[in-house]
Image: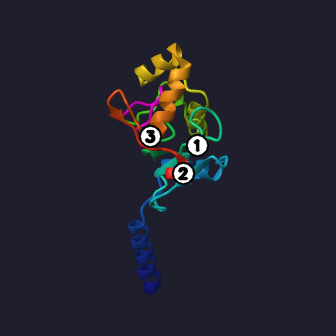
Amino acid sequence: MISLWSMKKKEDAAAKKKPKTSAAQIRVQKDLTELDLPSTMKTYFPDPQNLLSFTLTITPDEGMYKDGAYNFSFEINNNYPHEPPKVKCTQVIYHPNLDLDGNVCLNILREDWKPVLNLNAVMTGLQYLFLEPNADDPLNKEAAEEMRRDRDQFLRNVRVTMRGGSLKGKRYDNVLASAQ
């Protein structure tokens, strides 16, 4: 009887040492197992034990941002899915929906977030920003204005900045997939 009691104490102590899995971690794990990413998107987990922090790389195969590789950091807090993940572009790129600090203007990451949305929806939304930039809801107002006013000049600016060029005194990161 005493040995049973001491075994139970040891089990309880071991259970206390093991970190509890949060509801956010369970939901993220579910979202990740249900991911249906195209070949143009890849996830990377620097710490495989931490599913709440990872990187997504998008390499569009069409559109004006084709041939680039764009990295986004995902930070998910313990209130997920009641709060959206924090997503930032880790490179400086010329895009109407991304500011120079990497902030992303995507409606489902702000006012249109709902707990029924998942990581797949966010990743698909990010990819769509490279296929169809939205000049009507910009973070980079200069890029959006250029896109509305002179689309050909906007396309030239995108190409110059993708190669790591400068535009109006600001240097952009080389995001060409061949440079990665």
Instruction: In the rendered structure, find residue 154 and report the number of the disc placed on it.
Output: none
**Disc 2 residue type?**
Ser
For disc 2, the marked residue is 178
Instruction: In the rendered structure, find residue 67 and report the number of the disc placed on it.
Output: 1
Counting from the top left corner in percent of width and height, residue 37 is at 65, 47
Q: How many badges with numbers are in the image?
A: 3
Q: Which residues are magenta?
A: 89-100
1 or 2: tag closer to the N-terminus: 1
Mark 1 nearby-residue class (10 Å; few <14, some 14–19, many ≥20): some
Residue 116 covered by magenta stretch: no
For disc 3, the marked residue is 89
Circles 1 and 2: CB distance less than 8 Å? yes
Counting from the top left corner in percent of width and height, residue 141 is at 42, 20
Q: Secondary structure at mark 3?
A: strand
Tell me the CA gap for discs 1 and 2.
8 Å
3 or 1: tag closer to the N-terminus: 1
